[in-house]
Image: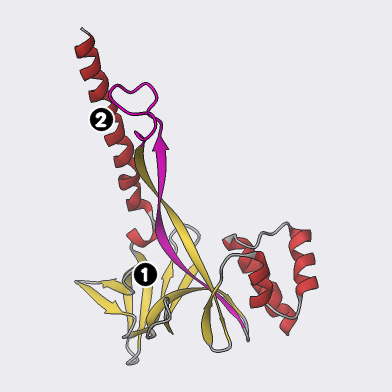
Amino acid sequence: MSSMKESLFKAALILYLLLVGALPLLAQNHFPSDRWYQGKIYCTDGQIYSGRVKYDLDHNLVQLQTETISTFTAFTVSHFEIQNETDKKLRSFYSIPYSENGDNETSVFFEILTEGDDIALLCREYIATHYRNEGTKGVIGMNPSNGLKTSTGYRLAFKYYFFKDTEVQRYSLKKKDLFTMLPGYDDEISLFMRKNRLDHDKRGDLIRITAYYNELQN
């Protein structure tokens, strides 16, 4: 009888882990890069294409859906625009030479979040993987000291950059580096952040802070 209980318990545990692992995979279809948008692609040769647009920032590609599907690289595209279906806001992505690891520069797509005469805030979204440890206390045949089960989940994440001094500079999301990226107005920016309860590492807050800095520059 105990052997049957053990088998049933193990089967239930395996089913649970499979379901937990499958749910994040199903959720991937809901990320922004999985959708088609109404948009335009502006090529370096002067051609402009309109239609349904889908982007792949991992590989720096953008696709156009008309009668067929055409694929463009960041080398052949100066920028592209897409319109969100929900709020109708226009999102713009520009191809800019950049080296992530200090190697040779290559053309990379960056989304423009806000820009002024001197500084622009850019970002690149990506799908981050995170891990959750499942405790094994009471699981038959498992060693409590090292028998942890790991299930994966996915979330939308962002890397932020500033375009300044004619180059793209990665922002570390550390508060002290924000003032390095936006020099000359430390007191004004600190007061603006306190009054509006803004954080140095949140997307919407960074947009407001950078826009305010550009106003100070004028």
Q: Which residue is mark 1?
A: 57
Residue drawn at point x = 62 percent, y = 82 percent: 116
**Which amino acid, mark 1?**
Leu
Residue 121 at x, y = what percent? 57, 74
Question: Does residue 169 appear anywhere in the picture?
Answer: yes
Can you say which quadrant of the picture contains the N terminus?
top left
Side of 95 relative to 69 (left or right): right
Residue at x-position 39% and y-position 58%: 127
Q: Nearer the viewer, residue 98 or 5?
A: 5
Earlier-in-chain disc, 1 versus 2: 2
Is 61 on the left-hand or right-hand side of 122?
left
Q: Position of residue 171 (x, y in %)?
A: 56, 71
Report which residue position mark 2 lands on. 14
Quarter location, residue 209: bottom right
Q: Crowdedness of circle 1 by 10 Å Cα count: few (<14), some, many (20+)?
A: some
Hey, what amino acid is under mark 2? Answer: Ile
Foreground residue among 7 and 118: 7
Q: Residue furthest bottom?
A: 45
Q: Of all residues shown, which one is farthest toward the top?
A: 1
In this view of the protein, which residue sits in the foreground, 144 or 41? Answer: 144
Q: Is any atom of residue 88 visible in this view?
A: no
Tell me which segment is drawn in magenta.
119-148
Label 2: few (<14), some (14–19) or many (≥20) C-alpha neighbours in 10 Å: few
Q: Position of residue 41 (x, y in %)?
A: 35, 79
Residue 145: percent from left, percent from top: 39, 32
